[in-house]
Amino acid sequence: MTKAKKVHAKSGIKWEVCIYTNGKGSKRIKRRFDRKVDADYFIKNFSSLKNKSFVREEKVVRTFKTEAKFWLSVRGEEISPSHLVRVRGILTYLLPEFGDYPLERINNSFLADLRRELMSRSLKPATINRWTNVLTTIVNFSFKHNRIESNPCFGFGLLTEFREE
């Protein structure tokens, strides 16, 4: 719980309040007040406003198919033609199988299962990395554009590739 803290400033004693809007690591609001009563009133009102503002009436479920189309429409012109052909080829396999999955289901354990399935098909590590990279790129792009609240694929690593030279 947030409390007002007594601070000795040049202009006299002040009461300081530091509140994180969404927990640690989020935006921090810092205010100073002349009286402790004003600081406590700010804390009380901010908490009630915070609870009201984060109540969502309707939650939009984003599927992998809609986010892949959004990613292609936004980033399609920036990607090289050869990479775009490769990505579209991968998506022709992924969309029929995983297109209706909500993005919340595409997490690290889902990607590990997909990796195991692709390895059972005797695909090379570079190919498996390309496939999982397409999935994680689309999810990361949706997160960066605030279309989803959290990034479910954060921290997923790639396979090590052994190449004969």
Image: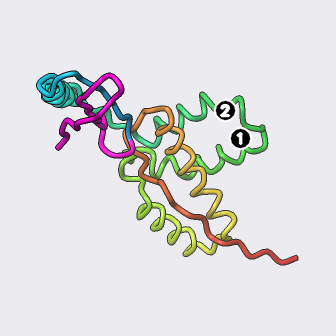
Callout 2 amino acid: Gly
Q: Nearer the viewer, residue 150 or 84?
A: 150
SS for dot 1: helix
Residue 149: quarter of image? top left
Callout 1 amino acid: Leu
Measured as percent of width and height from the top left, residue 163 is found at: 79, 74
Q: Is residue 102 above or below residue 55?
A: below
User: Distance of mark 1 from mark 2, alpha carbons?
Assistant: 7 Å
Measured as percent of width and height from the top left, residue 3 is found at: 18, 39
Q: Is residue 101 above or below residue 49?
A: below
Which image quarter holds the C terminus?
A: bottom right
Q: Is residue 72 left or right of residue 85?
A: left
Residue 157: quarter of image? bottom right
Q: Is residue 11 above or below residue 154?
A: above
Q: Which residue is mark 1?
A: 84
**Chain part drawn in magenta:** 1-25
> At 47% across and 67% down in the image, what residue appears?
112
> At 71% across and 48% down in the image, what residue appears?
86
Measured as percent of width and height from the top left, residue 43 is found at: 17, 30
Q: Is residue 131 above or below residue 120?
A: above
Q: Which residue is mark 2?
A: 76
Residue 26: quarter of image? top left
Q: Earlier in the sequence, mark 1 or mark 2?
A: 2
Q: Which mark is residue 36?
A: none
| Residue farthest toward the right in the current orientation of the protein | 165
> At 18% across and 27% down in the image, what residue appears?
39
Q: Nearer the viewer, residue 91 or 103?
A: 103
SS for dot 2: loop
Which image quarter holds the N terminus?
A: top left
Is residue 117 magenta-colored? no
> Mark 2 and mark 1 in contact (Cβ < 8 Å)?
yes
